[in-house]
């Protein structure tokens, strides 16, 4: 129940306020917060691409990649929320793939680069998850 309140509270925060919370959070909490920033930025990028503002959209995509990287690092460092991070990153990569199909040919390479980067982060998380499972046996 705490997570629901946590999510609702962060929905009303500005993106900048959420980014400040990411920096101040513990590694465990940083995972969720950084993924929220990434989700917002990907939604923003989608809207910006549709509005023809491809430079701003590409910047939002890059910001999403940066915060996804932070979430992955925090999950790996803390060993917490690995599964949550992997699932969220998979969904983000899928959303970016959908966006890629809807943008102009010239705008597709940076979006594909972002998808590829998110997939590398997912792979690292999966490796960490399976390494932890081996250690528990």
Image: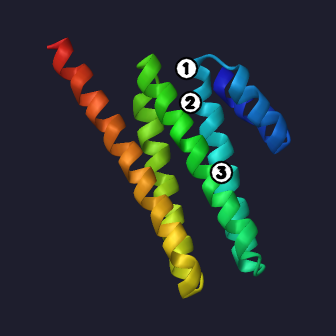
Which quadrant of the structure image shows residue 137?
A: top left
Instruction: Give the CA distance from mark 1 to mark 3.
Output: 20 Å
Please name the residue shown 51% across and 26% down the image: 74
The outermost residue toward the bottom is 105
The outermost residue toward the top is 136
Q: Position of residue 30 (x, y in %)?
A: 61, 26
Which quadrant of the structure image shows residue 19?
A: top right
Residue to which mark 1 is pinned: 28
Q: Quadrant of the N terminus?
A: top right
Instruction: Give the CA distance from mark 2 to mark 3.
Output: 15 Å
Please name the residue shown 80% across and 44% down the image: 15
Q: Which of the numbered marks, if any, corresponds to residue 31? A: 2
Instruction: Answer with left or right where residue 27 lies relative to residue 90.
Output: right
Instruction: Answer with left or right where residue 50 lies relative to residue 136.
Output: right
Please name the residue shown 52% across and 54% down the image: 92
> Label 3's element?
helix
Q: Which of the numbered marks, if any, corresponds to residue 63? A: 3
Camera-near label (2 vs 3) is 3
Q: Earlier in the sequence, mark 2 or mark 3?
A: 2
Instruction: Give the CA distance from mark 2 to mark 1.
Output: 6 Å
Q: Residues within 10 Å of mark 2 (few under 14, many from 20)?
A: many
């Amino acid at each position: 129940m705490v997570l629901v309140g946590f999510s609702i509270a962060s929905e009303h925060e500005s993106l900048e306020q959420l980014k400040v919370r990411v920096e101040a959070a513990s590694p465990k909490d940083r995972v969720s917060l950084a993924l929220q920033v990434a989700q917002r930025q990907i939604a923003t990028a989608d809207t910006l691409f549709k509005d023809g503002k491809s430079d701003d959209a590409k910047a939002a995509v890059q910001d999403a990649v940066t915060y996804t990287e932070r979430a992955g690092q925090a999950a790996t460092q803390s060993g917490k929320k690995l599964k949550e991070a992997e699932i969220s990153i998979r969904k983000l990569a899928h959303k970016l793939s959908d966006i890629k199909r809807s943008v102009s040919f010239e705008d597709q390479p940076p979006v594909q680069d972002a998808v590829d980067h998110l997939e590398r982060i997912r792979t690292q998380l999966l490796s960490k998850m399976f390494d932890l499972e081996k250690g528990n046996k």
